[in-house]
Amino acid sequence: MSLNKVLITGSSGGLGNYLAKYFSKKGHDLLIHGRNEEKLKSTQEEIKRNGVKVQYIVADLNKNNDINLLCEKAKQEKIKILINNAGIPCPNLSFEDITNDIINSMV
């Protein structure tokens, strides 16, 4: 019996990628998300070796249509756990230079 299915946004690299691998080792089926299909496919192949089911979805969370597609896929897959890890970097910005617009686009 599989454990609850997990959706991890931002799974194509960094912390999201690590969490996807971690949850797969714990026996959770996964829906992984990112913008880079090549990296998602590579992660999917690695996770499959842990004996769990894993699907991926390519979506840009700055686009409402992509958000809706991800939500529909999460409903179809009966996702029980969401790890909302997707984000955007703020390279070369000091804290005082981060505007409300930048913060809103991150959220």
Image (tube, grey):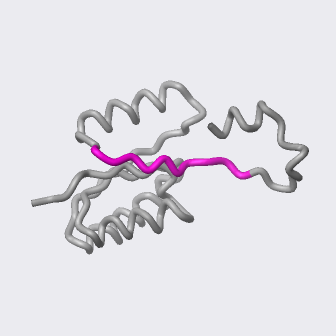
The answer to whether residue 17 is above or below residue 93 is below
Q: Magenta span has 82?
A: yes
- Residue 37 image position (x, y, % from top left): 47, 53
Picture quarter with the C terminus = top right
Q: Residue at x 30, y 55 (%)?
A: 30
Look at the image and give the residue range highlighted in magenta: 80-89
In the displayed structure image, the side of residue 52 where residue 57 appears, left or right: right
Quarter of the view holding residue 47: bottom left
Q: Residue at x 29, y 72 (%)?
A: 25
Picture quarter with the N terminus = bottom left
Q: Magenta span has 36?
A: no
- Residue 65 image position (x, y, % from top left): 48, 25
Quarter of the view holding residue 51: bottom left
* Front-lying residue, 97 or 13: 97
Report the predominant secondary structure element of the magenta stretch: loop
In the displayed structure image, the side of residue 11 where residue 28 appears, left or right: left
In the displayed structure image, the side of residue 47 where residue 103 appears, left or right: right
- Residue 66 image position (x, y, % from top left): 48, 32
- Residue 85 image position (x, y, % from top left): 52, 51
In the displayed structure image, the side of residue 23 where residue 35 appears, left or right: right
The answer to whether residue 82 is above or below residue 12 is above
